[in-house]
Amino acid sequence: MILDDIKKMVNSDLDMDKTELDIEALKTPQLHNKYLNILLDEKLILVKLEGEFKILRKFKWLYYTGKISQEELDENDIEPFPLNVLRQDIDKFMDSDEEIIKLTNRIAYGKLKVGYLESIVKIISNRQWLIREAIDWIKFTHGT
């Protein structure tokens, strides 16, 4: 799911009708469940991406150190790395590898979504308290 889509949903879902706080209070469990499910889905995607990153990093390490088999080179339709890279320089090549950068960016994006969703779930968890406080304030201002 795209972060912008999540933001639009949150803006729509968390907009409260202050004249119908009782209905808003009843919507809280459904909202909590909705965003908790989205959060769990995004966490699973993130775990999968992190696993893919480990596999890719190992593959690239084998590639840049020249330890990759000819069979793996053929499977991936790539040529052997033409340079002899010193052990201390391998990280420079790996850190600037386009595939690693793309996957690292996807992981960072996933972490941003997970963090955002965690904060939304926390806000929704506090929603009942906020609604109760709003009702108490209305009662106070109306002298009841």
Image: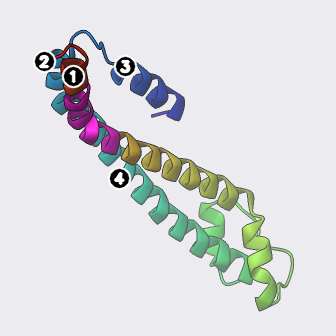
Q: Position of residue 126 (x, y in %)?
A: 27, 40
Q: Residue furthest front?
A: 143
| Residue linked to disc 2 | 144
Badge 3: residue crowd in 10 Å (few <14, some 14–19, many ≥20): few
- Above or below residue 47? Residue 33 is above
Instruction: Report how far apart the C-alphas of labels 3 and 1 lie in the structure.
Output: 23 Å
Q: Position of residue 39 (x, y in %)?
A: 34, 44
| Residue linked to disc 3 | 15
For image coordinates 19% across by 30% down, the residue present is 132
- Above or below residue 107? Residue 89 is below
| Residue linked to disc 4 | 44
Specify the amino acid type for callout 3: Asp
Q: Are marks 1 and 2 in contact (CB under 8 Å)?
A: yes
Question: Horizontal placement of 12 versus 63: left or right?
Answer: left
Instruction: Report how far apart the C-alphas of labels 1 and 2 lie in the structure.
Output: 6 Å
Tag 1's secondary structure? helix
Between marks 3 and 1 in the image, the one whose residue lies nearer the viewer? 1
| Residue linked to disc 1 | 140
Tag 2's secondary structure? loop
Quadrant in the picture for residue 125: top left
Q: Position of residue 86 (x, y in %)?
A: 82, 89
